[in-house]
Amino acid sequence: MHLMRVGAPGAEKPVVRVDDRSYVDVSDLVTDFDEYFFGSGGIAALAEPVAERIAAGETESFGDQRIGAPIARPHQLLCIGLNYRDHAAETGQAVPDEPILFTKSPNTLVGPNDDIRIPRGSTKTDWEVELGIVIGSRTSYLDSPADAAAAIAGYVLVNDVSEREFQMERGGQWSKGKSAETFNPAGPWLATPDEIPDVLHLGMTLDVNGVRRQTGNTATMIFDPFFIVHHLSQFMVLEPGDLINTGTPPGVGMGFRPQVWLQAGDVVELSIDRLGTARQNVIGPR
């Protein structure tokens, strides 16, 4: 199942994607794809009515409607740094012994085709195509990585936009370079795990102004999604609807020589196999 949300910011309605052109409206069945929905078994409950509506031809066209992030604002947005061996190498940093954890403000979450706004004072705004994990049930102290599969509601395409000066040169925590408004475009859809035959074999790309910058595959992850969820559950309670960004492959602007940064007027296009494509225009500061 592919969960999506369509409509104006703050007024999105929950739908289930049928194909590139059409969807089933489920806003009469669920309020939103939020903590309550995921935590109450909402995905399983939708299967039968969605199938019935598709069979009856009760579908609607996407048309030119805005696509929102496929989940409502999460309780927390967690991120794993340096989680691809080839990305760690391009940044000149050591492969970590255990996951590097940082947080982003949950209000960074925007739709997959919404604008990226460069923050005030920024000189080093960067891109990062990432696989996002959405948590499906309240989770803590998992016994093993194998147990994590049951706690995952699905996966989503994410751009973990970053301001590298704020992140690396201003002291304190990485969150300072990760939490500007619009810094977490996500979607177009959340794919439930049954839609992903092998989460560790997904191709990933990101282009800036039509130039390929990132080419990667989840096969080069250091810590896979199940390890990550198990690991985080030892330190905190994961809530339904929480989003975890799992790191980026090589090709970020920081890794080029000379380095390359996003500028107003740029266009970022990114994709992950089975998770769709996204396109963001870059605009200047407020």
Image (cartoon, rainbow, N blue to C red):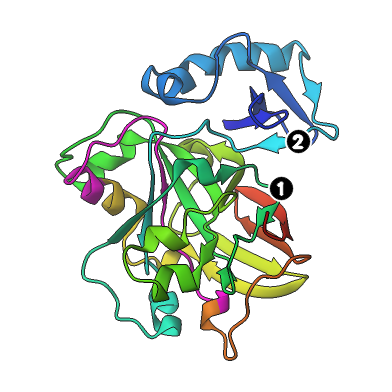
Residue furthest right in the image: 63
Amino acid type assigned to the residue bearing label 1 in the image:
Asn
The residue depicted at 53 percent of the width and 33 percent of the height is 71
Give residue 211's quadrant in the image: bottom right
Q: Nearer the viewer, residue 10 or 169?
A: 169
In the rendered structure, the answer to whether residue 211 lies left or right of residue 16 reads: right
Q: Residue 78: horizontal and vertical position, in percent? A: 37, 49
Residue span colored magenta: 230-253
Q: CA distance from mark 1 to mark 2?
A: 8 Å
The residue that mark 2 highlights is 66
- Quick one: SS at disc 2? loop
Q: Residue 177: horizontal and vertical position, in percent? A: 46, 63
- Quick one: SS at disc 1? loop
**Is residue 284 placed above or below 92 in the rendered structure?**
above
The residue depicted at 54 percent of the width and 18 percent of the height is 47
Amino acid type assigned to the residue bearing label 2 in the image:
Arg
- Which mark is on residue 132? none
Q: Are marks 1 and 2 in contact (CB under 8 Å)?
A: yes
In the rendered structure, the answer to whether residue 276 lies left or right of residue 144 reads: right
Residue 241 magenta: yes
Q: Residue 247: horizontal and vertical position, in percent? A: 43, 62
Q: Residue 182: horizontal and vertical position, in percent? A: 60, 49
- Which mark is on residue 113? 1
Q: Main secondary structure of the magenta part?
A: loop
The 10 Å Cα crowd at callout 2, few under 14, some 14 to 19, many 20 or more, is some
Q: Nearer the viewer, residue 201 or 229?
A: 229
